[in-house]
Every structure is written in C-alpha cells, then in structure tokens.
C-alpha cells in the first residue's frame, strides 16, 4: 500500500446526502471514521458518521476546524465553492483532485478536455451571452440543448431548443449564467462506466451498466448493459483514459451514449454515481468502498461482477410501493430521508437477476 | 407485512459490539434508526448509531429512558440480566422473546429443551455442586467437559475432565457456579445453520456453513459445508423446528456436530452469529438485515446464496496481516476497535470462491 490511512483514521466528506451516507458505511467496514460537512440540518449521512459539522461553505472557521480534524477530504458532489477548496487544500489532501473538479464543474471545460483526449462528445459551442447563442445555433443547428456551464444536475439548468423561435426563451431560462449549446446526439441507449483509480495509479472499472432516465432523472440501471464485446472494451478504455489523464484518485462515473458511430461521452462525474449503486449487490467490493479505498490510499478491491443486477431508484411516491418491494427478492437501500417530495431520491432497490 | 415498523422508527439494541455495529448498518438500509444501550465506553456500534446510551444494566433510570425512546428492542448477546428484561418488556416489545433467552442462557435448560423436541444432544448431567459431579461422572464417564450453566462464550467457563483425577480442579474452575457435565461427542466436523423467523411465522434458513474453531474461538466458516444432500436438509429442518418451538422472531445460530449417527445439536444462540458473517458477501440479504427485518415486522428477505464463501476471523495480531489482506480479493469487515488484544475479534474477511 502507498502510505495507506491506518485503521481509526478519519475521512472528511463534503456533503451529507445519500452518497455520503453510503460512503460512511463503506468506510466503517475498513475501520475508518467519517466526518461529514454539510450545510443542511439532519443530513442522511449523519446517523452513520462519527462526526457531523453543520455549517455553510463560506464559514471559514467551521471549514478550518473540519479540515484540521480529518486525514483526507473527499466529496459526494462536484459543485463545491472554489474558495472553500482553496482553504481546505491547505489543511488536508483532497481526492479526487482539483483538476478533476475544475474539469467536471464546467461543461465547456469538460467537453474541451474530452475532445483533447481524442474522445467523441456531442457537438457544442460556447454561449457566454445572448448574441453568442445566435452564432452557436448557426454552427450546431436545431434541435439542440442550452445548458448552464456550471451547477447543473438531474436535468436542471437546461432548456431544449427545437427551433430558432425557442432561442430567446431558452436563454431567459439560463438567468444570465454562461451557457453551452449542445447538439442532439442520435443514440440508441445510454451506458455508464464506474471507474476507479488508486493512489498507486492502478485502474479498475466495473462492468458498464445501461441507464434509463425519465425527465432527466435516472430511473434504472441494468448490468450487463446491451453492448457488444468491442463496445464493452471501448467503454472501459474510455473511462481509463479519462482517469489517467486527470491523475485521478477515487471513483468516477462516465456516462456514454451508444451510437452507430461509436461511444460518445455525455458527461463525467468525479464521485460515486447513482448508476453504480448496483455494485452493492453485484460485486464483492461496491463503488462506495472502492472510493474509500482509493482516497485512503488502500489497494483497490475486487470489483468483479458475480451477478446480473437491475437497480431501480425509489423517487418520491415510489415509497408508497415499499411494502410491496419488501415482499420481493429485491435488496432495499433507503436513505433515511424523513420527508417524501416529488422527484426526491428516497432510496433504491437492487434485484439480482438469476439465470 | 404484519404491522411493520415504518421508515424512521427506532430499534433499540442491547449491546454495542461488532454485532450491534453490523445490525446498525443493516437497519440504515431499511431507513430505520438504531439506539444502542451499552455499559462500555466507545463501543464499536456507536459510530453507526443514531443514539447511544452508556449505562449499566442495573441503571433503571437509563433503561427506562432507553425503552421509551425505541419502538422495539433486540440484543446482540444473550446474557442480559433478568431484572433489566423485566423492566424493558413493560416499555417495548423484545425480539427474540423471553423464552428463547431463558432457554439459551442456561445450558441445562437448553439441552433439556432440545431433547424434548426429539433432537440429539451430547449426553449431559446436572452438576449443582461438587457431590453431584461424582455422580455425573458415573453416568457420563470421562473424558467429558464441565461447563457453567450460564454466561459461557468463546470457550470461557469450561474445564475438560480427561480422567477422574481432573474432577476437583475442574469443579474449582467453576468458582461455585452451577454447572453441567457434557460427554464428548465423536464428530467429524461442526456446521451451523443461521435461521430466521418472521413475525408472520415464516422461516428462512441460510445454507449451512462449516466451522473451524481454535482454542474455543471460531476461526473460519466456509459455505457450502461438507454435507450430503440429506444432511443439509436435516440441518435446516432442525433449525426450523427450534425456531417454531420457541415462537421465535429474529435470527438464530444453531451449531451442529456431524456424526456417523446423524446431526447433534451443540448449542443455539438467539442472535446473529459469527458463523453467519459470510452472508454479507454470499447473499443478497445478510443475516444482520434478516434479523432487523424480523424484529421490525418486515417480510424476511432473499437469503439465497449466490456465491461460495470462506469467512475468516481477524483475531488479535491477525490485524498485522491487514495490508496483505487488502491486496487480495477478500471483502474486509473491521469493527472499529481501537486496541488490539490477544483473542479479541477485530474483524473478519469474506472471500468469494470462484469456480
């Protein structure tokens, strides 16, 4: 092991949602403690953490105390304010590193980076202002999607432009934020690779999963994905190329569109990923433990898939079906959220598919 | 579901060791909170619990507050003082119930109960005092083992009698406690069945595991056990008979000796069991979740075995080999204990055996 964190060491996690919660459970298996930093009260991760700091990302006193109390810092979401990172990186190592965050926080930077690696992306154009949108539509054409460069997730901060006449309304939806225009990609389905890279540079990728979204939110992931052997290899090689190029440490989600012209990278997420939740019941070492192993400097674990799995998110009123799910052979994973809201991810179920 | 606990309800657990810790993780998956009651400071379960009460079992104020704060009570060890149970059962349901505890807390009661079900046990005799030991040796013969009736675990409170001349020293080892003399059983190996029974009376048993002990402490469990198909069926039927006879709710460990005259019940443990840790990586629903489901009134989960597994305990200095284990394909489960002591269970590893 390359200077691995010893048993009893503490991992600081920025964000206390369900991803932080499941990271905390994985850390406990390795005898590591977790300190959660989260602005919101009663975050899902709190019950499973050794310590919780409730403070905002501009509270430098709280950030400093947090940074001093931990041995390494990681995060469950990528939109962390830069000033907070500037402070924290003086106190403890941050994994994955700043380059991965800077790349994935900005859709324009991300797509430029991916094309620089020789990977395919959707056609795109920079739209810093309303005037630029007109020129972007000239080059990309319609239909297209206008997206804010930063802070987008689960389909938020996006507007479809089916024809030129939609342009003004789409720009208004950006509320003045710098944007990027992306051309439509004619894809048959979406897959994702959950890849991991250790501090020693070793790379391990899980089998690609096939994702179905509804209204911009992931509904299901199934493994194995519908891919040819060569597509499967391509998918894993793409993820490995991205991980290596960023000198990455931790788990990353890489979303890919499957097209007749090969695999097109949709986006990368520098963290554990909803489309990797199937690994909890399909592999010996799940994505959460793999991430903890990487950021703690441990060797990566055995991510071989022992079973076929269908993962289904429980969103909002899906919780009404919980009693029925409990009667099936599904593995239930709830996030401990007190209040059910429309569109809110409340949990997920993993179902092993037997031959 | 028979009146299942809703998401957000709290399970009280007596005992904060590694079993309580892993029960807390399982409860979190079902959106349930856990309140740990434990006399010792900084118990392994504390980091993963919603609440922890540090108090002794004769602190009736603390017990009362604990009992009022939870929706159901369970436990990770069977030697709970009777007065504490008398108080707690007025405040919340206790699962598994008093009959299971009373039976398993006392080796004489346990063996009498098992024989009453028509099951085979080692030959035994009541040894309330030194005089009785002489008569017991007349009926059982030597070699035999003298054991305290209560409070024994991991080989403690036991003395071997290889010949009559050992009798006085063996009795002295009991420190005046009522004892039971057990005849030696000529067995080829030990297996155990981890069985579960729900509040609706449904029973689900995991595949039997084969156990190897060293110095009275479990070292390894492997599944599948070396059993014929009919022995496997017998083992599961024995466990089911015990579960039903006790109107049991929860997970139970049933240890069996394999002999040329059939299966002989060694002992039953009314709780999750070290020899069931393999289920964490061999099944969709592990023994810890199965126990939580049962005591919470949920349907039992899918305990089918998807993989062959070898579980190995990490005891004392075994922790020196942690860096090596981390490089293998083993799943590591540590208990967060700060101090390594000889004979102390620090964690375990599960290794999936691929064909």
Image (cartoon, coloured by chain):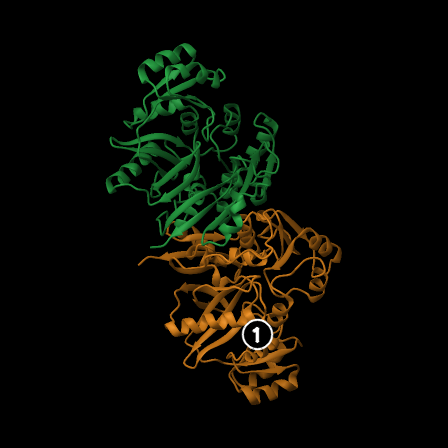
Chain colours: A orange, B green
Quadrant hosting residue B340: top right
Picture coordinates of residue A218, whole percent (x, y)? 48, 65
- Mark 1: few/some/many CA within 10 Å (<14, 14-19, 20+): many
Q: Which residue is mark 1?
A: A158
Quadrant hosting residue B233: top left
- Out of B6 and B171, give the one closest to the viewer: B171
In the image, taking residue A136 as reference, residue B77 lies left or right, namely left
Residue under mark 1: which chain is it in? A
Q: Among all residues in the image, which is located at the extreme right?
A: A61
Picture coordinates of residue B10, whole percent (x, y)? 53, 41
Quarter that holds the C terminus of chain B: bottom left
- Out of A176 and A273, give the one closest to the viewer: A273
Is residue A324 at all visible to an observer of this figure? no
Q: Residue at x 41, y 71 (%)?
A: A232
Picture coordinates of residue B183, whole percent (x, y)? 34, 22
Picture coordinates of residue A4, whole percent (x, y)? 59, 54
Q: Among all residues in the image, which is located at the extreme top?
A: B131
Q: Residue at x 46, y 47 (%)?
A: B349
Count how many numbered circles sit on residues in the image.
1
Under tag 1, what secondary structure?
strand
Quadrant hosting residue B193: top left
Quarter that holds the N terminus of chain B: top left
């Amino acid at each position: 092991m390359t200077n691995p964190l010893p048993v009893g060491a503490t991992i600081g996690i920025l964000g206390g949602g369900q991803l932080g919660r499941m990271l905390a459970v994985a850390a406990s298996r390795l005898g590591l403690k977790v300190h959660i930093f989260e602005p919101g009260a009663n975050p899902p991760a709190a019950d499973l953490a050794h310590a919780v700091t409730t403070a905002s990302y501009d509270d430098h006193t709280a950030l400093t105390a947090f940074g001093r109390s931990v041995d390494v810092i990681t995060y469950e979401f990528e939109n962390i304010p830069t000033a907070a990172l500037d402070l924290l990186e003086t106190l403890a190592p941050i994994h994955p590193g700043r380059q991965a965050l800077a790349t994935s926080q900005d859709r324009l930077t991300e797509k430029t980076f991916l094309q620089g690696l020789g990977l395919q992306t959707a056609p795109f154009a920079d739209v810093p202002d309303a005037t630029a949108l007109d020129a972007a539509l000239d080059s990309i054409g319609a239909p297209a999607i206008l997206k804010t460069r930063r802070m987008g997730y689960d389909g938020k901060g996006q507007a479809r432009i089916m024809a030129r006449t939609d342009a003004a309304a789409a720009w208004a939806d950006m509320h003045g934020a710098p944007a990027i225009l992306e051309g439509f990609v004619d894809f048959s389905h979406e897959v994702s690779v959950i890849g991991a890279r250790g501090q020693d540079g070793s790379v391990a990728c899980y089998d690609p999963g096939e994702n179905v979204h509804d209204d911009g939110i992931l509904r299901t992931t199934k493994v194995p994905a519908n891919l040819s052997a060569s597509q499967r290899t391509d998918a894993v090689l793409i993820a490995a190329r991205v991980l290596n190029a960023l000198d990455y440490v931790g788990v990353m989600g890489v979303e890919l569109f499957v097209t007749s012209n090969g695999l097109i990278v949709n986006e990368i997420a520098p963290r554990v990923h909803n489309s990797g939740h199937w690994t909890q019941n399909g592999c010996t070492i799940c994505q959460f433990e793999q991430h903890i192993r990487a950021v703690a400097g441990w060797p990566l674990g055995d991510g071989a898939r022992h079973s076929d799995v269908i993962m289904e998110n429980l969103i909002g009123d899906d919780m009404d079906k919980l009693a029925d799910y409990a009667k099936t052979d599904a593995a239930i994973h709830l996030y401990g959220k007190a209040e059910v809201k429309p569109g809110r991810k409340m949990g997920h179920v993993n179902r092993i598919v037997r031959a």
